[in-house]
Image (cartoon, rainbow, N blue to C red):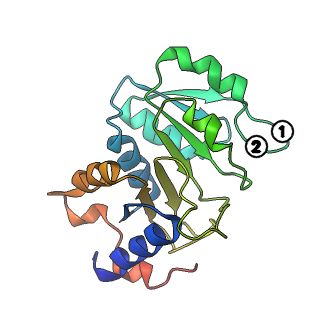
């Protein structure tokens, strides 16, 4: 079951990336749901996502009744086109999710201009890793620990919160919940970083 290794794993990445804290989840879907819950995203809300977002996002959105606002991407960088994102801002999205498919990430000034909670997913592309303690991007960072991603524990997910308030919200999601939502130490013992 969950134990000290999973906590150490989350703590390592929190320190390395400059996050306030993190939680290892039993699977990627739980990590996505926890990130959305951190910002109070509810049934009927809209969230901007990339047209290249992993299928898991659409599955979680469908289960939770969240409407995806799917932005087209630049063919060279696979980043969401800024015009496509701006076109959705008048639809009152609750958050934006940025996938680092090829390790590209928009300028921080661009992201701050959205005035939205930002969830970044670095499962497939881990950039800025050469700046320990300062590589945290967005308000929440997600990592799928599946075998085909950049960092693996043969399954599971990692959710990191940049700010203390968001980390408190994230942690409270799992308080009083079954330990079945958290990653077990046996998988962390097999992690490949």
Q: Secondary structure at mark 2?
A: loop
- Count numbered badges in the picture: 2
Above-or-below relation of 167 to 130:
above
Name the residue located 63 percent from the left edge and 22 percent from the top edge: 86
x and y, in percent, of residue 186 in the image: 38, 82
> Which of the 4 image quarters holds residue 3?
bottom left
Looking at the image, the residue that sits furthest to the right is: 76
> Which of the 4 image quarters holds residue 110?
top right
- The reply to whether discs 1 and 2 touch (Cβ–Cβ < 8 Å) is yes
x and y, in percent, of residue 69 in the image: 56, 26
Above-or-below relation of 128 to 105:
below
Q: Give whichever of 83, 155 is nearer the camera.
A: 83
Q: Give whichever of 2, 119 is nearer the camera.
A: 119
Q: Is residue 73 left or right of residue 23?
A: right
Looking at the image, the residue that sits furthest to the left is: 176
Residue position for label 2? 78
Disc marking residue 9: none
- For the C terminus, which image quadrant? bottom right
x and y, in percent, of residue 177 in the image: 18, 57
Q: Is residue 145 visible?
A: no
Above-or-below relation of 187 to 44:
below
- For the N terminus, which image quadrant? bottom left
Q: Give whichever of 169, 178 is nearer the camera.
A: 169
Residue position for label 1? 75
Name the residue located 55 percent from the left edge and 29 percent from the top edge: 114
- Crowding at dot 2, Cα within 10 Å, few <14 / some 14-19 / many 20+, comes out as some
Q: Is residue 101 visible?
A: yes
């Amino acid at each position: 079951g969950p134990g000290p290794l999973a906590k150490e794993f989350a703590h390592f990445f929190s320190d390395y990336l400059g996050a306030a804290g993190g939680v290892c989840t039993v699977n990627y879907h739980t990590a996505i749901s926890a990130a959305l819950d951190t910002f109070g995203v509810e049934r009927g809300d809209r969230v901007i996502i990339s047209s290249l977002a992993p299928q898991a996002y659409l599955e979680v959105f469908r289960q939770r009744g969240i409407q995806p606002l799917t932005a087209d991407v630049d063919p060279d960088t696979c980043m969401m086109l800024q015009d496509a994102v701006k076109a959705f801002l008048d639809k009152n999205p609750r958050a934006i999710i940025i996938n680092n498919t090829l390790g590209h990430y928009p300028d921080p000034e661009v992201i701050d201009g959205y005035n939205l909670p930002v969830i970044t997913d670095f499962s497939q592309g881990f950039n800025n890793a050469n700046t320990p303690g300062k590589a945290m991007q967005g308000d929440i960072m997600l990592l799928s620990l599946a075998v085909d991603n950049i960092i693996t524990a043969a399954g599971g997910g990692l959710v990191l919160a940049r700010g203390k308030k968001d980390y408190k919200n994230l942690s409270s999601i799992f308080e009083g919940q079954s330990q079945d939502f958290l990653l077990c130490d046996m998988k962390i013992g097999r992690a490949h970083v």
